[in-house]
Image (cartoon, rainbow, N blue to C red):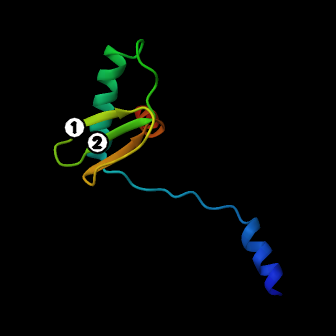
Amino acid sequence: MSYAAQRLEQIERQPEPVIKKVDPMIIRAAKQIYRYYADSYAAQLPRPMGIAINRIDMTGKLIYSQLILLPQESFVPMELIELSDYH
């Protein structure tokens, strides 16, 4: 096989999705924060992209646009929160 054919084969391959395991305690904290948001402010505020959870004290904040995390924070996307509501 020539170099060009190998290179073409590498380009044509689709990247495999990266699956990361998230600590269940972080997901639980994110779900609680999202439930509070949904019960209180969902009609007034837009849907967030996700929730940033502080791993030290399990507090969190909703993220709407730019994602800038502190070293002790983890981001939980809304898809993961909504998915875990059904499982």
- Give the left or right position of residue 79, taking residue 30 as reference: right
For residue 67, the mark is none
Give the image quarter of residue 77. Answer: top left
Horizontal and vertical percent for residue 79? 48, 37
Badge 2 local density, few (<14 within 10 Å), some, or many (20+)?
A: many
Q: Distance from label 2 to label 1 (Cα)?
A: 6 Å
Give the mark count: 2
Q: Residue at x 43, y 32 (%)?
A: 64
Q: Residue at x 38, y 42 (%)?
A: 76
Q: Is residue 35 above or below residue 79?
A: above
The amino acid at mark 2 is Ile
Give the image quarter of residue 35. Answer: top left
Horizontal and vertical percent for residue 70? 28, 50
Secondary structure of the residue carrying tag 2 is strand
The amino acid at mark 1 is Thr
- Give the left or right position of residue 47, taking residue 41 as reference: right
Secondary structure of the residue carrying tag 1 is loop
Q: Are marks 2 and 1 in contact (CB under 8 Å)?
A: yes
Question: Where is mark 1, residue-wise?
Answer: 59
Question: Where is mark 2, residue-wise?
Answer: 53
